[in-house]
Image (cartoon, rainbow, N blue to C red):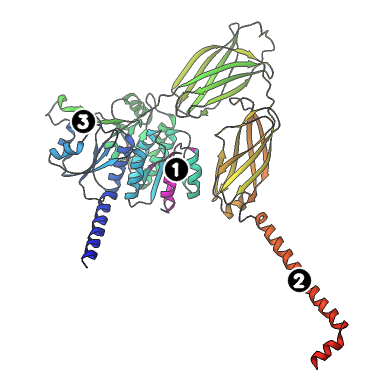
Amino acid sequence: MKSRGVIISVLVFVFVFSHQTVAIGSDFDMLVVNSEEWVDVYSGVMYANLVGKPFNFVTSREHSVRLPSILGSENIYLIESGKHPFVMGYKSTLEGKGFSVEERISAGGKTLNLDLAGDLDVDKFIVIDDTYGYNAVSLCSYAVVSKSYVLFVDKENIEEVYNFLKDKRSGILIYGYVDEEVTEKLSELNPEIIDYGDKFDNNIEIVKRYRQIRSIDQVTLTSGDFMELGLMRGVEPVLFIGRDSVPEQVADYVKSSGIKVGVLVGNELVSSAQSLKAKTGISVFLKFGQGSGAGAGSAAIRDLDLLRLPSTALNVTIESIAFNIVNNELEIVYKNEVDVFSYIKPSVNIYVDGESIQTVGEREPVLIGANEEYGSTYPLDLSKYDFQASKLTAQVFLQYGESKRSMSRVLEKELEISIVEIRDLADIEIIGLSYDRDKEVLTLKIKNNGPSCHIKPTLALTVKEDRIILGGVDTYHLNEKTSRDVNFELELSDEDLELNENLKVEIVYGERESFMVDKISQDMILKIKGSDDSSSISYPLIILFLLIIIGVLLVGALRKKDKLRGKKNPKKRDSRLG
């Protein structure tokens, strides 16, 4: 009996301890985050919003000293970064000010983010990539009113997030640009996707959805470059305006939406806010500071406590520019030097010995992936000129930016055009397309009949009645006169396979990775392999059928033999009977 009581006590202790460490619950008055990792801060803020508790967060070392005087709550739940807190040991600082503090140490932004998701009783999740912090700001208010939790997902943690979501039977929204691996894996869970390829268009869609839930004619105006306490409470939708100008679609939406008031957070975007007011007629108020508690007057106003989000300065360059005399085309290679995608729209004026002869470029913005090169060719007629003896130059005017309609960055450069003579002899063919049910892998088999080359394949499929695109991003290398398989991990049901019996495969290819200018398009029959495939069960069936036939023939032969014996020995048979 005594040992049983000890066991029960231990079990009770384990239950209570695990309950306190795994789930925060609601036994706190305020949540505070002390971390320089903005994903820690955002995750804590989202958690507090969804459990209906106030929150605050440290924005600097100086701010950590002031913060205790304005918390106004007794029981604090403190989330502190294990590696990058603004100040060490903030728990003891708060306890020294008379607060009761429960502490949780964060092992890292995305780890904490998923841990907190497990502590919540929610069935709606929004998936974004933490590379683009402005997407998190855009979503904050909508996540609050729609009772959704924001998950930060990339190719490194997609398996862990997928395992979490697949058991939730939850509604999933993918917002903005995410890794291709994320989209492919989550396609099995039938997510909704918002990605117009433009941060302002995406943001406008979220504002519309917010106002469908909570009808309101006031918005918060910001650029999405920082988090601020009032901005993160979800009281009103967040509408983006540009740093230097107001994108056309933003002004058009405001004019047609019935929005009457815009509250601008910070004074960095005053000129853009004034431009929005002039174009739309809405009233604009500026939130530029906060009371310091030091008395009346301007000295009592302090700057807003802003937590800046990491941003990568866009940088697109010209890698090379040449005139190819084989096909009379100007070849330009553009290079994205940073780890975020960018849109480009170049205009290139061609000069021969100082005389302007032609302007080439892109009529629509072109997307360049992170740290990628993009080659483009432009027809160029130099038949009237002795270009081999002349000086060829180009005046490049390259607009680029993170949005198709707001390419505010410009590269202007004069470059000398080199002469090249390059023949692309790449020659490929598509020889097979199959799906392995057991491995859940779709395989495209490609044969290279020519020299070493590069390929970029694309396939369009229907999965759970939604159209999805495989490929179109990664480039694959084919050695000279060899074949290779390109595999796509994808779960397809029987219904999906019926809808995708015939697929159109497109491949752009070329000897040079930056100039894959050739294209092959072919309709392919999707062959099914694996345990449920008719081809895999046909051999056992055939063998069984043959064994049955052989068995029947043997039985028939034995019976016939017995009859013959009976005819040859009738007396012997009669003597046995007698």
Disc 1 marks which residue? 158
Q: What residue type is labelled 2?
A: Val
Q: Name the residue under label 2.
A: 552
In the image, residue 159 lies in the stretch drawn in magenta: yes
SS category of the residue bearing label 2: helix
Q: Give the residue at x 15% y 35%.
A: 69
Q: Name the residue under label 3.
A: 63
Q: Along the line of sight, which residue is nearer the eye, 255 or 123?
A: 123
Residue 3 falls in which quadrant of the image? bottom left
Across and down, in percent, residue 72 comes to 16, 41
Q: Earlier in the sequence, mark 2 or mark 3?
A: 3
Labels 1 and 3: the sequence-earlier one: 3
* Residue 258 visible to the viewer: no
Name the image quarter holding residue 381: top right
Residue 359 in the image, given as x and y percentages of width and height: 58, 16
Q: Position of residue 568 (x, y in %)?
A: 88, 82
Which stretch is magenta?
151-179
Q: How far apart are marks 2 and 3 (CA)?
A: 91 Å
Residue at horizontal 32 percent and vertical 50 percent from the top: 120
Q: Nearer the viewer, residue 507 or 443?
A: 443
Q: Is label 2 or label 3 in front? A: 2
Q: Is residue 111 visible?
A: yes
